[in-house]
Image (cartoon, grey):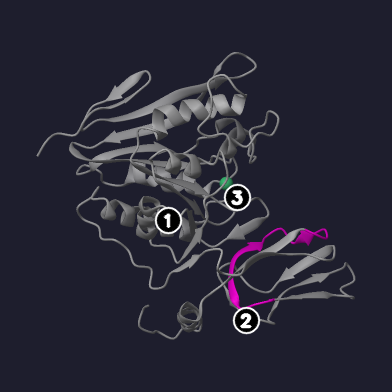
Amino acid sequence: MADNEAFTYNGGKVEPGETQDIRYGISETYLGDPVRIPVTIINGERPGPTVFLSAAAHGDELNGIEVVREVAYEWDLADLAGTLVCMPVMNVPAFLAQQRYLPIYDRDLNRSFPGSETSTGAKRMAHRIYQNFIAPCDLGIDFHTSTRGRTNMLHVRADMSDPAVARLANAFGSHVIIDSSGSSGMLRTESSASGTPAITVEMGEAHRFQRELIDEALAGVESVFAEYGLRGTSTVNWPGWRTVISDENEKTWLRADAGGIVDMHHDRGALVHEGDRICTITNPFKDDNVTVVAPFTGLLVGVLENPVVYPGNPLCHLVELKDKVRRVVEREQSGTPEPTL
Ligand SMILES: [Zn+2]
């Protein structure tokens, strides 16, 4: 079999069979010092696809950091067919500040791709990341969490109308895929449009390492590696049930119509039936409570974590399930074992 090729980026080269830990300059501080992001490139001896794994495009979304680090540093990749480009912390300035956006002007790095050499600070950083470490890849996974103060069940976001993206999304093996093309400047959107199919994995809450979600995501990465032949040992994962949430499904962020303190009655991932109590908004005296009920039967993909709201604040992300899937989820959540769908 032919040897794998070297991976090259501006300033370096990683030979087949070689692993490099790089600190790559993407900007400079007020002191003129470099702002550098950690990148690990693992180039297998055997040929195969080049895959990026990225996290912390939003600086306080930490779960993905551990996913990327465990793949890069704890997995046995001696037999890897292909190349891994691992970026556990893309948005270093926001990571240092433990906030979502780049601290300067609150720019969103994940709306700045593919970037530009001569534009804003965010777009210059995005450009250096994108040109060197995203564009050379054949596919990629970008890990996120819910925005601070909320949590979500692990799910994939992907443009399912693009067959190459759909293949990747299905291979990850999550229960829930939200089908959307994403926004302009989003890493997965721009990358997919330029021929590097990419998905976003959303998992849990900001500012945490959540072990069970990290393990679920690692199983997803292993399943993707199996689909594309990066590791001979693993098999593609079928999650037991799957729902692809498209525009045909009802889905909504339920918002608070009253300010107050929220008593949430369900966890992320729970199935709620039409008319079920989802949460109660209370005042300090616990009188005059406002009950929020499910407008339709569906899955609570995301829920509020920080239990205080103004009117208009989101309470939960509810998505409709088709009958067949709903019945499987009902059985699963009632603890009755049942044949998979
Ligand atoms: Zn994010």
Dot 3 corresponds to which residue?
206
Residue at position x 48%, y 48% from top?
143
Q: Percent x, y for residue 79?
A: 19, 44
Residue at position x 63%, y 41% from top?
100
Dot 1 corresponds to which residue?
217
Residue at position x 42%, y 60% from top?
216
Give, as a single range, the part of the protein colored magenta.
294-312
Q: Percent x, y for residue 298?
A: 59, 74
Kindly state the secondary structure of the residue where label 1 is placed: helix
Quick check: marks 3 and 2 in contact, CB under 8 Å?
no
Say if disc 3 is inside 8 Å of ligand 1. Answer: no
Dot 2 corresponds to which residue?
273
In the image, is 23 to the left or to the right of 274?
A: left
Q: Rounded to the nearest whole Å, what is the CA distance between mark 3 and mark 2? A: 28 Å
Is residue 299 highlighted in magenta? yes
Q: Nearer the viewer, mark 2 or mark 1?
A: 2
Note whether 157 is above or below 327 in the view shown: above
Note whether 198 is above or below 322 in the view shown: above
Label for residue 42? Answer: none
- Say which quadrant the C terminus sits in: bottom left
Q: Rounded to the nearest whole Å, what is the CA distance between mark 3 and mark 1? A: 16 Å
Q: Rounded to the nearest whole Å, what is the CA distance between mark 2 and mark 1? A: 28 Å
Q: Earlier in the sequence, mark 3 or mark 2?
A: 3
Of residue 18 and residue 5, the one placed in the foreground of this image is 5
Q: Mark 3 is on which residue type?
A: Ala
Q: Residues within 10 Å of mark 1 (few under 14, many from 20)?
A: many
